[in-house]
Amino acid sequence: MTSTLRTSRCLDFAPRSNGQVEITHRLVGKKYLVGQHISDLLAAWQQPRSRQDAVDNLQARCTPDEAQRTVRFLEEKSLLVAEDHDETFFVQAPRQGLFGMPILARPRTAAPAAVFCGLPYGHGNAEDINCRNFPSHLRHFLQTANLMRDPETLDFGFLDRATNFGPLRQRLAQGRCCDWGDLRLGLNESSEVVHEKIYKAARTLFDAGHTPFFLGGDHSVTWPIVRACAETYPAFQIVQFDAHIDVYDGVAPLTAGEPPHHGNFMSCCLALSAVTVVHQLGIRGVVNSRPHKHPKQRITWASDLATNGAMVLPEIDPALPVYLTFDIDFLAPHAAPGTATPVTGGPGYTQTVELLRRLLPPLNIIGADLVEVNPQRDKDHLTMQVAANLLLTLLNFLA
Ligand SMILES: [Mn+2]
C-alpha cells in the first residue's frame, strides 16, 4: 500500500446548503456526497502527505476502524491517489468481463495475460463517428447471446470445426486472458488528447508484459498502439486485415502536429524504424486502383485469398513478432455490413476463418486490435456475430 497520498487533481467541489459537499470526479465520471470534514481532508491533501496522517486526521471524529475504512474508500474511488499516480487516462472497469473473463484491476502487477481494452473513439472518420459505440454494443450483444459467462464450457466448434482451439481452452483454464474495461474519453476531447490516452493505455499493457487486444474505435486508434509497441519491441511486423491500405495521404495529407485519421495512419506506422514490414491482406476496391506503395508494404489482393485450395498466402517471418490489426471491412459487406467504408468483394466468414487457421498458428502475435465495427450500420447483428467470433478465434492465436 502506498504511504504517501495526494488528492486527485480531477475533483470539483460544490458545497450544498445542508453542510455536505458534492464532489465530481471528472476523470472517473462519478459524483460523491461527503461531509465537510472529508472535504477539508481532501483540501489539506492537495499537497502529498502520509496515509497515516489522513487516518489520524479522521480519528478526531470517528473510531480508528471507521477512519481506516474511510481512507480506504477515498483511495478505492481515486479521490486520494498515490503521489506519483498518472491521472491522464482512466480505464473504466466493466460490470462483467467480456465472455465472462476475469476483470483486470491492476495491469502493472498482474501476471502476463491477453488483455481486452475498449477504445470508444470514432472521430478518426470525420464522416461517421459511430464505431466509437462498438465496445459498449459488443458487451450488450455478448450478454444477449449468452456469451458473458463460463467461457470454459463453450464448444468452440461453433466458430470453426477445423481449427484447433486447444490454446484458447488452455488460456481460459489458466486465467491468462482478462478484460481491463473501456478507456474513458470525453466527448469534446481533441484527437491529440485521445491518441495520447490510447498510447498510455497501450504502454501500460506492453510495459507489464501483457498481450493487449484493443477494441476500436476507428482505425486511427492503431497508430498510438503501434507507437507504444515500437517502444517495447525493437523490431516487429504488422499484419493488417483490411480492404484498404490506409496510406491515402494524397486524399487528406498528413499535416504537421495533426494526428493521423483512419485512412492515413499506416503512413505513420511505416515511418517507424521498429516496423520492419507491413503485410496487408484483403486489399481491393477502386480506391486502391493506383496504390502508392511504400517499400515496407506487402500487399495481398483479396482475389488471391480465394478458397478451394487456391489461397495465396503471404510469406510472414515467424521469427519476428507480429502486431495484428483487423479492420472488419476486410470481410465482404454481406458478411459484415456494419462498417462505415464497405468495399465490394472480399472474403466471407468461412473463408476468413480458413485464412486465419492457415496463417496464424506459427506467428508470435504480441498485440492485436479489431476496428471499424459500426453498430449503427449493422444488419440483424450480423457484424456483431462476426466480431464476437473473430475475437475468440484471434485470441486462440495470441502469444
Ligand atoms: Mn479499411
Image: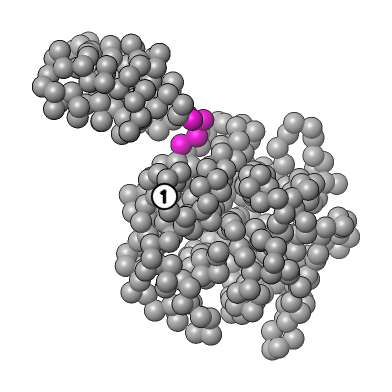
Q: Residue at x 39, y 17 (%)?
A: 48
Residues packed near mark 1 inside 10 Å, few (<14), some (14 to 19) or many (20 plus): few
* In the depicted structure, whether residue 74 falls above or below residue 291: above
Left or right, 204 with reference to 146: right
Residue 193 in view in this figure = yes
**Callout 1 secondary element:** loop
Residue 202 is situated, as x and y percent measured from the top left of the image, at 56, 45
Prevalent SS, magenta region:
loop
Left or right, 113 with reference to 130: left
Which amino acid, mark 1? Answer: Ala
Q: Residue at x 18, y 12 (%)?
A: 18
Furthest-bottom residue in this view: 308
Residue 372 is situated, as x and y percent measured from the top left of the image, at 61, 55
Whether 375 is among the magenta residues is no
Residue 348 is situated, as x and y percent measured from the top left of the image, at 62, 75
- Indicate the quadrant containing the C terminus: top left, top right, bottom left or bottom right: bottom right
Residue 146 lies in quadrant: bottom left
* In the depicted structure, whether residue 69 falls above or below residue 367: above
Residue underneath mark 1: 110
- Indicate the quadrant containing the N terminus: top left, top right, bottom left or bottom right: top left
Residue 78 versus residue 307: which sits nearer the camera? Answer: 78
